[in-house]
Amino acid sequence: MTAPVRVGIAVVEADDRFLVGIRAADTVLPGMAEFPGGKCESDEAPRACVVRECREETDLIVLPVLHLATVTHQYDHGLVELHFWRCCLAQGTHQTCPPRSPFRWVERSELADLLFPEANCSVLEMLAAEASDMDSDMESASA
């Protein structure tokens, strides 16, 4: 059995918005939404990978603060091991991606409207549950 391709994924949040891009037409899973990330180099930890990939793809410097999940998934193109890290922007980092970047800030409420690859489902469910918890907390506070 072939070893899975290790991938680091940065779930970058700022002001209840998330950094999301749309995969290019000439890539695997074209047109699908994605968080910044990519393949880990041979000796690279997934946590370090998310920092490197986010900087390469968006010019943003992020700090991985929480490991959300590791998901192994078989796609038609191969087996992947996805390491999802919740990230925040490093202090003093701007929130603007360069024009060449396919990434933009998306409100938490918009995530459910985007088509992500299947292996992202558990993380998207976590983010949706957080929104539900926040709504409940706000209702309790105003009562």
Image: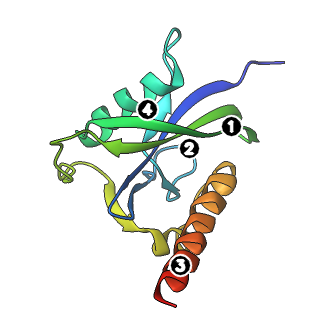
Of tags 2 and 4, the one toward the viewer is 4
Inspect the image, locate mark 1, and give the three-letter code of the amino acid beneath it: His
Q: Position of residue 130 (x, y in %)?
A: 57, 64
**Spatial distance from mark 2 to mark 4, Cα to Cα?**
19 Å
Disc 4 element: helix
Q: Position of residue 24 (x, y in %)?
A: 42, 51
Name the residue: 67% across, 31% down: 81
Quadrant for the N terminus, please.
top right
Quarter of the image for residue 15 reads bottom left
> Relative to 23, is 5 above or below?
above
Inspect the image, locate mark 3, and give the three-letter code of the amino acid beneath it: Asp
Residue corresponding to mark 3? 135
The 10 Å Cα crowd at callout 3, few under 14, some 14 to 19, many 20 or more, is few
Q: Is residue 142 left or right of residue 106?
A: right
Name the residue: 63% across, 66% down: 129
Inspect the image, locate mark 2, and give the three-letter code of the amino acid beneath it: Val
Residue corresponding to mark 2? 28
**Spatial distance from mark 4 to mark 1, Cα to Cα?**
22 Å
Of tags 3 and 2, the one toward the viewer is 3
Of tags 3 and 1, the one toward the viewer is 3
Residue corresponding to mark 4? 50
Inspect the image, locate mark 4, and give the three-letter code of the amino acid beneath it: Val
The 10 Å Cα crowd at callout 1, few under 14, some 14 to 19, many 20 or more, is few
Q: Position of residue 45 (x, y in %)?
A: 52, 18
Asked if the residue under mark 1 is in contact with the one under mark 2, i.e. CB atoms within 8 Å, the reply is yes
Name the residue: 54% across, 75% down: 137
